[in-house]
Image (tube, helix red, strand yellow):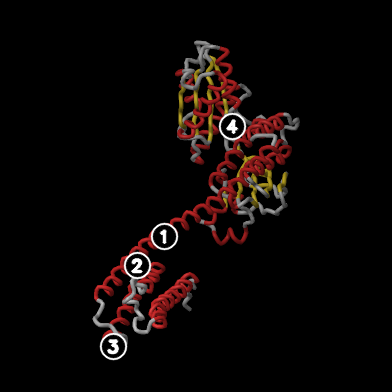
């Protein structure tokens, strides 16, 4: 079966063309007919002071262009020739100059009309294309405006940032008296964080029953409760690897079995830096637009940090509560994330000016602008200058330039001087995933003149 697309525009053009030729023929014949009724011996107005016959060909040429005007002139010349040849009207000799002038003038007028019709057609095409682009821009603008308004409403109604949510979760975990049951007490908070910042709509958290099996009853539920079998291939894979597993990568290796037994989109273990798994987050529903690599990486990183918080709360973690040990732990976690998930991360070491008041202002601004996953550690060096270690996950070298420009504007507003004018010594390291956290800290302390 062959499908053809009807083009209404071509039909309109075809009808318009037939009407144009009918008008041309009517105008061409109407002037000689009028002349015949006015003066039968001179229907072509050859003996009149003004050549009225010119209107019969000039009007079609002006209105429709060269082809119509030329056809009209040739019809008139043919009629004059026939009338002279067969002596239908008294014409003493053939009006060569008259007919030649009629033809040339009509051709010139028709060519002039065609030139302007081409220009008008070109402008019409340009105008149509610009109107289409304007309509697309208007729709995109309206969509962006609605999205921006919704984002403003969401931010206005939200009281906590991602950093505040993680800090609140950490405090709640550390304040639990029964240290053997931390995951159960904070499970609902974990799902709330995932819902707010990773757009998860339906998920369950299952604690571990053994080293390789989850309990069948969830300790927290978001959205509708879905019964999940402990033998689900995504859960088994997440426990075996200790990494986030999504239906995307599993479909490539276990297509038939997964489609029959799986009712999950993503499974991610709550594991600490030492690899101990406290539970598994099983996600059943999330928006299609949020089901992409960047958001899944964010979920994996968040669950890793939450696993560290649970480990610390249950006193399983190998680091103490000192600031240096805590920062070293997060550095090791970030190095692991860089190696495992290819997450771009930078470690920024800033040696602030000697002026204590100015240094304090700069430090306050730097710490106030930290994001949810950023970590900071402040030390004094041998010159009594403050040194700020700032760990910035999900940040590349290029994005650091934007961060530096934003901070420079804030510093200019608060201190009257930009980043470069304050002469802040900057040491920037981009993590590769191959570093040793302790050795890296020792080298940076040595470079910034900090006593170990």
**Nearer to me, 148 or 208:** 148
- Do the residues bearing badges 2 and 3 touch, measured as CB atoms within 8 Å? no
Image position, residue 295 (x, y; %): 57, 44
Mark 1 crowd level (few <14, some 14–19, many ≥20, 10 Å Cα): few
Image position, residue 9 (x, y; %): 48, 69
Image position, residue 108 (x, y; %): 31, 65
Query: Looking at the image, which residue sits at the far right?
Result: 177
**Of discs 2 and 4, which sits in the foreground?**
2
Instruction: Determine the secondary structure under disc 2.
Output: helix
Label at residue 87: 3
Mark 2 crowd level (few <14, some 14–19, many ≥20, 10 Å Cα): many
Comes first in the chain, label 3 or label 1:
3
Label at residue 370: none
Residue drawn at (59%, 32%), measured in percent from left and top? 371
What whole-number distance in Å separates the C-alpha atoms at marks 2 and 3? 31 Å
Residue drawn at (53%, 31%), measured in percent from left and top? 392
Mark 4 crowd level (few <14, some 14–19, many ≥20, 10 Å Cα): some
For label 4, the residue is: 371
Residue drawn at (55%, 48%), measured in percent from left and top? 292
Q: Quadrant of residue 259?
A: bottom right
For label 1, the residue is: 120
**Nearer to me, 15 or 198:** 15
Image position, residue 413 (x, y; %): 56, 22
- Do the residues bearing badges 3 and 1 touch, measured as CB atoms within 8 Å? no
**Of discs 4 and 3, which sits in the foreground?**
3
Label at residue 110: 2
Comes first in the chain, label 1 or label 2:
2
């Amino acid at each position: 079966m062959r499908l053809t697309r009807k083009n209404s525009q071509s039909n309109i053009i075809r009808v318009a063309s037939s009407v144009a030729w009918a008008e041309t023929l009517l105008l061409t014949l109407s002037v000689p007919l009028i002349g015949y009724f006015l003066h039968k011996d001179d229907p072509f107005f050859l003996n009149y002071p003004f050549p009225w016959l010119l209107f019969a060909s000039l009007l079609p040429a002006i209105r429709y262009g060269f082809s119509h005007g030329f056809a009209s002139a040739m019809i008139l010349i043919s009629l004059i020739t026939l009338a002279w040849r067969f002596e239908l009207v008294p014409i003493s000799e053939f009006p060569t100059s008259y007919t030649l002038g009629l033809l040339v003038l009509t051709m010139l007028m028709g060519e002039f009309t065609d030139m302007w019709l081409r220009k008008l057609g070109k402008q019409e095409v340009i105008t149509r294309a610009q109107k289409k682009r304007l309509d697309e821009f208007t729709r995109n603008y309206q969509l962006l405006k609605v999205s921006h308004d919704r984002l403003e409403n969401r931010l206005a109604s939200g009281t906590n940032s991602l950093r505040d949510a993680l800090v609140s979760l950490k405090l709640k975990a550390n304040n639990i008296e029964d240290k053997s049951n931390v995951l159960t007490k904070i499970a609902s908070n974990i799902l709330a964080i995932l819902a707010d910042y990773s757009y998860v709509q339906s998920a369950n958290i299952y604690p571990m029953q053994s080293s390789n099996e989850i309990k069948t009853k969830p300790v927290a539920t978001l959205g509708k409760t879905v019964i999940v079998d402990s033998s689900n291939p995504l859960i088994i894979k997440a426990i075996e690897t200790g990494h986030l597993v999504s239906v995307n990568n599993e479909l490539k290796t276990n297509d038939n079995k997964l489609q029959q037994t799986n009712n999950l989109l993503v499974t991610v273990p709550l594991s600490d830096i030492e690899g101990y798994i406290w539970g598994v987050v099983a996600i059943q529903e999330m928006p299609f637009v949020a089901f992409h690599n960047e958001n899944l990486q964010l979920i994996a990183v968040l669950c890793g940090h939450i696993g560290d918080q649970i480990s610390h709360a249950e006193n399983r973690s190998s680091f103490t509560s000192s600031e240096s040990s805590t920062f070293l732990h997060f550095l090791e976690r970030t190095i692991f994330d860089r190696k495992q998930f290819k997450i771009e991360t930078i470690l920024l070491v800033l040696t602030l000016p000697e002026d204590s008041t100015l240094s304090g202002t700069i430090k306050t601004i730097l710490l106030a602008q930290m994001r949810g996953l950023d970590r900071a550690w402040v030390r004094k060096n041998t010159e009594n200058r403050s040194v700020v270690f700032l760990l910035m996950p999900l940040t590349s070298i290029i994005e650091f330039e934007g961060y530096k420009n934003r901070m420079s504007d804030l510093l200019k507003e608060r201190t009257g001087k930009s980043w470069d004018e304050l002469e802040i010594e900057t040491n920037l390291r981009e993590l590769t995933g191959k570093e040793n956290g302790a050795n890296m800290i020792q080298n940076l302390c040595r470079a910034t003149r900090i006593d170990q």
